[in-house]
Image (spheres, grey):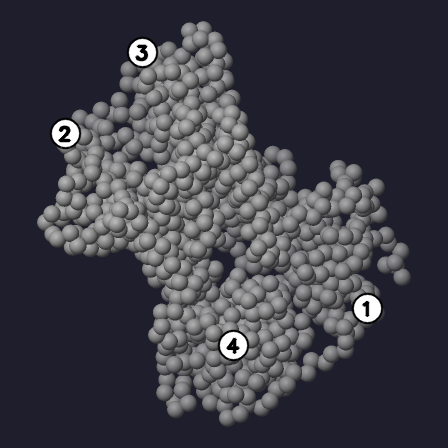
Amino acid sequence: MFDFVSFIPRAVMQGIPLLFGSTGETLTEKSGNLNLGIPGIMYVGAISGVMGAFTYEQSVGAANVNGFLAVAIPLFCCLLGSFLMGLLYCFLTVSLRANQNVTGLALTTFGVGFGNFFGGSLIKLSGSDVPAIVLSATSSYFRRTLPISGSTGWFGKVFLSYGFLAYLAVVIALVAAYILKRTRVGLHLRAVGESPNTADAAGINVGRYKYAATCIGSMIAGLGGLYYIMDYTSGIWSSDAFGDRGWLAIALVIFTVWRPNVGVLASFLFGGLYILHMYIPSGMNLAVKELYKMLPYVVTIIVLVISSMRNKRENQPPASLGLPYFREER
Amino acid sequence: MNNRAHNPLFHVSRRAALPWYRAWGIRAGALIIALLAGALITNLITGLNPLEVYATIWQGSFGSARRTWVLFQNIAMLLCVSLAITPAFRMRCWNLGGDGQMLIGCLATTACMILLGGKLPNWAVILCMLVSSVLAGAIWAAIPAIFKARWNTNETLFTLMMNYIATQLVAYYIIIWEVPKGAGKIGIINQSTQAGWLPQIGSYKYLLNILVVAVVCFLMYIYLNYSKHGYEIAVVGESERTARYVGIKVDRVIIRTMFLSGAVCGLAGMLLVGGTEHTLTTTITSGRGFTAVMVSWLAKFNPIWMVLTSFLLVFLERGAGQIATSFGLSASYADILTGMILFFIIGSEFFINYEIKFRHAAGKGE
Amino acid sequence: MSLDNKTAAVKMRNITKRFGPVLANDRVWLDIYRGEILALLGENGSGKTTLMNMLSGIYFPDEGSISIDGRDVVIRSPKDAFDLGIGMIHQHFKLVDVLTAAENIVLGLEGKLDLKAASAKIREICDAYGFEVDPNQKIYDMSVSQKQTVEIVKVLYRGADILILDEPTAVLTPQETDRLFAVLRNMRDAGKAIVIITHKMHEVEALSDRVAILRHGQFIGDMPTKKTNAQEMTNMMVGHAVTLNIDRPDPVNPKPRIEVRGLTVRSIDGILKLDDVSFTANSGEILGIAGISGCGQKELLESIAGLQPVEAGSISYIEDDGRREELIGKDPLSIAEMGVSLSFVPEDRLGMGLVANMDLADNMMLRSFRKGHSLFTDRRTPKELAQAVVQNLEVSTPGISTPVRRLSGGNVQKVLVGREISSAPTVLLTAYAVRGLDINSSYTIYDLINRQKRNGVAVIYVGEDLDVLLELADRILVLCGGKVSGIVPGRGASKRDVGMMMTKLGGRADE
């Protein structure tokens, strides 16, 4: 019998970084910026948080960490690091009108390198004999759950067993969906992504919206990296551990047809697909497990193909996605 | 309200064409500034003086005959993938799947070496490797192309996903073929018989690969600039409507071009496995499919300039790697340095395409 | 003069704007008054739209000053313009397709988003001026005239009292035009300042109180409309007195060349674009196609050229010896392979006829690059052709290796037409061949077309200027809403009759 009570929390925890990433990327893409730097940004978000936590833990000693600071410092560092990455992307693509694909890829190269480099340096600094940084003190605050989650049986396990960042991810996604759909800022943002010319003529500051959406989007995506380290892996950083989740987050944006609220369930589904191979009884045949790991990618392709076949007006990417905007283009 | 209005400080406008030497001058300038910035950062981290930094980078690339050969081998591999994706890019088809197409070529080569090695004469094994890797890469690229041609499915994300499917497929076969059982890796294939190993020219292990890529580079240049196919690719890339108007079958060109793209990626995979590595891992391509995007774009999709840009990136990577090992830094240092230099060059394009005019303070309101 | 006593709502002084080497506006002076409709008149490319774009904040002037109600202002963005009460309705509508009318109308405003309240206010405005807008309809479901209405409501919603309309009637039927003009007069009487950009003389006369004329980016003069006449305005517009005097040689030995029967075409969205269209185009003759824009002209030409999927009907190509070839179901390549030499000068020159980023020589190759069995392209012949076209048609270009996007509109068109006629076609299709061209270039094009006609080519000429059609075409086919409204001989046809047929099926000339 398939063990849903243990599977669902695992799937959700896998899904949370993807949810952060895809919500951030959705906001970014709604402004017409296709930010392929998200994988790098999530690395930077993670390592910035790790560096903050590491410095704090080292300075006061792991035993005396203050709960509030242990959460606030990594959170702030993470947001700052990913914000700067978003700012760099915007400066190049919006102000200097550089090619978005190339800029994004360079950002990913840089970000992944940045993460692994400083991760490696910290590992050396900590003098540990395993190639990893362990921040269990900080992580214990990030992982803290409601006290009743343990005493409510399967309900607690499925719904209450997560750290606060997981709930934050859901809240951010729902708020983002609300803003996009119901507020003036959201309306303006959609207009910027669909037709910057029109938005400009309507008196909307296109550059400012692109900067804001992309930087906020980066910060949200960065939190995904932080969640992964502080909660999912219990505060253990090791090189390349975050893997290709950033790309999956970008795929998820398409999967959800640019709707962060859909992203909540979709990301859990993706998380489930990502770990399904651990739950499929395959006996000793390890090779088959590798094939199961293809699932999220195959599903994304199927969604991509189906949505392009259906060609529904509302389900298409923002019309100006990937294109630089210059008002006086003639 | 804004009754105290004043004129904006500066004003950006599009440039008329810049002569090519000034354009490349600006790029060279950006590169120099980037190198200085890179030296400065390295100096801050390692305490080395900038001259020593560049000496170390030079050491890493040309420090010994072996390093020089490795440098050129890496350039050849990167250049080969860059050449492969360039036809697609000229067509404005963002093939980010170079990695997967190369990997699937590696897989096909490995399959031939393991399954046919020793059973067929060596030349036949190599022929099979060549055909199967080229076909495998081509098909891998043609799948997204067919969907793009038919339904305009976004190729950027489709090819990206195909990379991961290729990785998992390779992971699957690595376990199937692992030696010894349970090792989780294949090890050197046919170490004793050397079946399926590409022949070595003299005592130069890497020379064959380098020569093959040089030929591919030349052919690609001719193909893109002088052949009818190359012209069709350019027209489709500039305007699909114009292409239809003159009777070019756009879907056929898309599929054909991606097929070619994948085929050359597959070839690169064969050169890598059959020529130098003689093994298969999931990370054997070292992300070259992505670096190639930047190589190709930096060279403005011109195969000849791509020799230079791939040299630049490999040189930096090897050099930064050397800095990392000499000073006990993580090998990822190379990525940071490369990323930084790319930012400068990407940014410099702005100054080629646009000009900034500063306005006089005259004409103030009130 | 009562007009002179008012203070100007807008004063533009010494406005200069350059686009690269092109001087679009050269020290222009212009005054705009409230309670008045000003017609800004000028040929295409005379800088009318550029000037108004600077007033509405789309462009920023290189030099010069603007004052509103006597106060110097700097308009850096459309938002600044809105704040000053300036609203512009662009020729290419600035609407977001996937949003609703109401969402588009409130776009760019501040405060809480309340679409219900907005819808109520929109209905109020519509009632006041007699518009019809469904606030919840998506723009992509709307007709052009509905979109224009949304644009006007959008400007009014913002409380604009200086309205600029850029060629508002280009896409409207006469009834819609009349309705628009009535609304504009209402607004003028309500004390708003209105500028209408146009190059149609009768609109100037019917609507405006004052007319200002630009030529080659320079301000030529302004005067009350009542004190001038069409001839004087035309003279000021083009710089010297012109009588449209287009050559029209008699057709030589016309024989049926293209026969269209029952042609029916639907757009991708399923809208009927051509409905049972039948006609014959003869060799050695110019068949003019008249109609309000968007009445199926594009689909008609593209069907013949093999670019448009056809629902029903037949298009036969008739050879000199009477043999017939069916063109429907063939793409441009197979039509050419059948030996049918068909040339097509499409409306969208840089987006379809030419590749904007390629140079002249490479553009010449578009039609001919397949020739020969070699794998490689022949680069010499196109270069020679490019040289010849530059010389014979007096294309002004730095050289044949200049990307065509750097050429001016007239020169781009010469390159395109030059290439299309170089293959010695038997059928020549042209769509709006002189749109955006100055008078001299236009005449060069008429001349080229006439030369083709003398060579026995069957020319199908889609035009928008009735005066030109009446002087150039041997026969005129009038389209109205995708149907053939009538076919009249070009000689002796009256402009009034053709105009009627454009707007009403069969018009008055209902034999």
Residue depth check, mark 4 versus mark 2: number of the one nearer the observer = 4
Q: Who comes first in sequence, dot 3 or dot 2?
A: 3
Image quarter where the N terminus of chain C lies is: bottom right
Q: What amino acid is labelled 4 in the image?
A: Leu
Residue depth check, mark 3 versus mark 2: number of the one nearer the observer = 2
Numbered circle sitting on residue A151: 3
Residue depth check, mark 2 versus mark 1: number of the one nearer the observer = 2
Q: What amino acid is labelled 3 in the image?
A: Ser
Residue depicted at x 36% and y 48%:
B76
Residue depth check, mark 4 versus mark 1: number of the one nearer the observer = 4
Tags 3 and 2 touching, CB below 8 Å: no
State the residue position of label 2.
Answer: A283
Residue depicted at x 77% and y 40%:
B5
In the image shown, does A315 or A164 lie closer to the viewer?
A164
Q: What amino acid is labelled 1 in the image?
A: Lys
Regarding mark 3 in the picture, which secondary structure is present there?
A: helix
